[in-house]
């Protein structure tokens, strides 16, 4: 009588197998690495040498080519960490926990990069390194959430317990993501509102936003590479007692 | 989905939406404190306190910038296209400061509702354009301007 209903596609359940995940990530890695390299080089050269200067900021605006992708990625990475954490909580999937754990340091780095480049741009443009406006403060909170997740993982020795607590913290902090996104619309902030909106034409000429798009794609590819490398490493460490890992190590 | 997983899914959704509602209500209650600056309309309506440090934000009114030749004293008006507030400042203005530029000034309101600013920050808007485009738009008078809502939330 037990009729089994498949809620999720097959690959979702296959992801539960550390070995299968390890192998599929190994196959995807080279492609993403090449793409990340090409996009980042092309985007950087285009942004620094060929994109026109800005009318009022001159060349200092070019920091957006790092600032915008890193800020975007810091938020996407957080959402990914929270979703992976939720999957780990609900389906008790070990690989999801490992993905969530691997997301945290990458996202924290991106948040630091976004805050630092923003401060460097803010000094000449606004006249101040830091202002406690809603956008900057919510971004700083994002960094602290990342640090909290990292701290939980290193403070709790039991892996399952650590993953559980970190996932709960990540889910609680998820509320910050829409706050970051809409802070510039809901409140008076010094940070300007979004230049790119889904419903409108970007408030920027294509010569400026095309290299930005290339950089964003490059950052996401780089994120994929770095996440897969970290997760594979995590899989090997946690599955070190499994026979397939022992075989793999012996082969080398 | 087995009942155990369903139960955990409900707990996860409860965390996300529970925290969302709690934070949403808190933000709603604190909304005025989260604003970085007061708009000229709020100042004209007397919502901004006197004799305490506040920030005021708006667009620098064309032709209102008055520089003292002997010192760094400068006065200018800022507007949200509805009300106008006069700002007095003694110091070096940021590079981006110009007429028609959005700025945020920190200082105290005196009895004449003039902001005695101790710090002036330029607020960049969301428009980025190369110099040629800016020149062309300026000449044709189609320069994109932030809307009044930007300064009046």
Image (cartoon, helix red, strand yellow):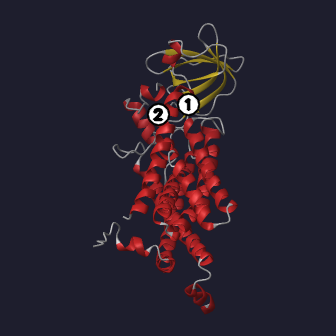
> Which quadrant does the N terminus of chain B fall into?
bottom left
Q: Quadrant of residue A141?
A: top right
Report the disc number at residue A186. 2
User: Which one is nearer the viewer's eye here, B105 or A153?
Assistant: A153
Q: Quadrant of residue A140?
A: top right
Horizontal and vertical percent position of residue B34 = 56, 30
Q: Would you call the spot at circle 1 few (<14 residues within 10 Å), some (14-19), or many (20 or more)? A: some
Q: Would you call the spot at circle 2 few (<14 residues within 10 Å), some (14-19), or many (20 or more)? A: some
- Contact between marks 1 and 2 (CB within 8 A): the answer is yes
Which residue is under mark 1? B34
Q: On the rendered structure, is A207 left or right of A60? A: left
Callout 1: chain: B
User: Which one is nearer the viewer's eye here, B73 or A4?
Assistant: A4
Report the disc number at residue A18. none
Question: Element under label 2?
Answer: helix
Q: Residue furthest top?
A: B112
Find the distance from the CA under tag 1 to the CA under tag 2: 9 Å
Q: On the rendered structure, is A13 left or right of A76? A: left
Q: Quadrant of residue B121?
A: top right
């Amino acid at each position: 009588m037990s009729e089994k209903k498949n809620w999720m596609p097959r690959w979702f359940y296959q992801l539960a197998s550390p070995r299968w995940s390890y192998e599929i990530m190994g196959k995807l890695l080279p492609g993403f690495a090449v793409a990340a390299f090409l996009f980042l080089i092309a985007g950087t050269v285009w942004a620094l040498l060929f994109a026109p200067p800005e009318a009022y900021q001159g060349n200092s605006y070019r920091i957006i080519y790092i600032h915008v992708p890193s800020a975007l990625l810091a938020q996407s990475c957080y959402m990914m960490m929270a979703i992976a954490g939720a999957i780990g909580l609900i389906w008790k999937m070990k690989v999801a926990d490992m993905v969530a754990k691997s997301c945290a340091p990458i996202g924290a780095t991106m948040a630091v990069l976004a805050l630092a480049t923003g401060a460097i741009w803010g000094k000449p443009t606004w006249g101040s390194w830091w202002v406690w406006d809603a956008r900057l403060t919510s971004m700083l909170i994002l960094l602290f959430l990342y640090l909290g997740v990292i701290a939980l993982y290193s403070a709790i020795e039991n892996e399952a317990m650590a993953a559980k607590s970190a996932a709960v913290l990540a889910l609680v902090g998820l509320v910050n993501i829409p706050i970051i996104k809409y802070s510039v619309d809901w409140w008076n902030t010094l940070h300007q509102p979004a230049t790119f909106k889904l419903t409108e034409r970007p408030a920027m000429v294509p010569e400026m936003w095309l290299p930005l798009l290339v950089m964003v794609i490059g950052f996401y590819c780089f994120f994929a590479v770095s996440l897969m490398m970290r997760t594979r490493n995590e899989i090997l460490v946690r599955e070190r007692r499994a026979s397939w890992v022992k075989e793999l190590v012996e082969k080398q | 989905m087995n009942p155990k997983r369903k139960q955990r899914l409900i707990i996860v959704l409860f965390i996300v939406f529970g925290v969302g509602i709690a934070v949403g209500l808190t933000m709603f209650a604190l909304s005025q404190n989260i604003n970085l600056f007061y708009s000229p309309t709020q100042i004209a309506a007397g919502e901004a306190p006197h004799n305490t440090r506040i920030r005021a934000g708006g667009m620098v009114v064309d032709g209102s910038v008055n520089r003292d030749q002997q010192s760094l004293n400068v006065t200018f008006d800022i507007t949200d296209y509805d009300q106008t507030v006069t700002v007095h400042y003694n110091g070096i203005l940021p590079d981006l400061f110009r007429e028609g530029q959005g700025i945020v000034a920190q200082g105290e309101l005196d009895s004449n509702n003039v902001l005695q600013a101790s710090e002036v920050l330029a607020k960049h808007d969301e428009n980025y354009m190369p110099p040629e485009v800016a020149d062309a738009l300026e000449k044709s008078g189609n320069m994109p301007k932030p809307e009044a809502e930007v300064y009046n939330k």
